[in-house]
Amino acid sequence: MWKRCKDGKEDLGAILKSVKSSFDDDLLTALCEASWGVSKSDLTDEFLMEQIHSITDSYQNQVLPPVNELFLNELKMNMDNTDIQSRVTDYVISCNKLIKKYGLSSFFEDDKGTKKKWKLLVNSLPAGLKQKVQNEIEYRYPDAQTSVLKLSKLINHQALEQAIEDRALNRARQAARKPKMREQLPFQRKKRHADVQQQKPDKRPKKFAVRNVEKITSKDQPKSKGTPKTGCFHCSGSHYLNDCPTATKEDRDRLTAEHSKKAGKPQRKGTPNL
């Protein structure tokens, strides 16, 4: 802006807008009365910038929140982002936004603040990646504890290696599934064929069933003639006198006449014997 004004011979004061003029007038009046104790006419841009930084650099309501717990809950790495470098960069951006959001910037300004920041970044990593990064820092890259740049490069490298391992593991699992699927395929085909056969209706004529019904029906039906209650008059067998195998014609005539006489009925010619 200053260079443009110099080259174009423009008035810098006419182009730039003062900090005081950017404030809402009602808000500025309330701050002067209730917070700063100065009149609006005495305000300068330098004073206003100091007050702005004192507000933005302090945590809300002057109450320090549980920082570690806060970042564990809110700082997350987006594992859906397939670009590893972009994923790590977004992770660091999210961390910086949370620091500003809760007014914690003053805690992360010097070397001690850098160490606190790397702890927050490492603690909120996904479990598998977190373990790898902690191991590397402890035994091979201790300098990453004092440099966010080195730490982000280390996280990026370990995340890339983990992604390669995960892809290789997924391929191995898929390859292991294929032989099992091939072994199960013939069995599944046979099972499906058997199920289909069971579901098909039997369209063949039920000859045996008809025969069985006929036999059962013929057995269950009583004979039209039946059997005498007192048995055969000649041999007391379970048949009528006319069917007696041992009775002669004379025996039949005699026994029939006797039976008719006892019953009080005359024997008629041509009437079949009992």
Image (cartoon, rainbow, N blue to C red):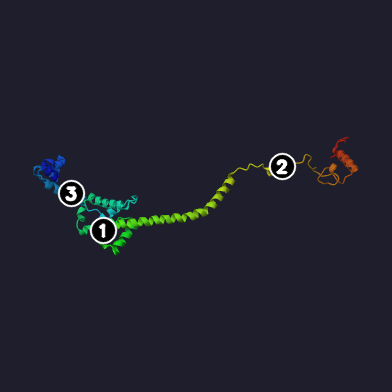
Q: Disc 2 versus disc 3: distance between alpha carbons? A: 105 Å
Mark 3 in CB contact with mark 1 (< 8 angstroms): no
Mark 2 closeness class: few <14, some 14–19, many ≥20 residues within 10 Å: few
Residue at x 29%, y 58% (from the top left corner)? 154
- Residue 33 appears in the figure: no
- Residue 105, given in percent of the width and then of the height, sits at 21, 53
Mark 2 in CB contact with mark 1 (< 8 angstroms): no
- Residue 99, given in percent of the width and then of the height, sits at 23, 52
Mark 1 closeness class: few <14, some 14–19, many ≥20 residues within 10 Å: some
Q: Disc 3 versus disc 1: distance between alpha carbons? A: 31 Å
Which of the two residues, 10 or 7, is positioned nearer the viewer here?
Answer: 7
- In the picture as drawn, the residue positioned furthest to the left comes out as 42
- Residue 256 appears in the figure: yes
From the image, tell me which residue sits under label 1.
150
- In this rendering, the label closer to the viewer, 2 or 3: 3
User: As shown in the figure, which amino acid type bears the numbered disc 1?
Assistant: Lys
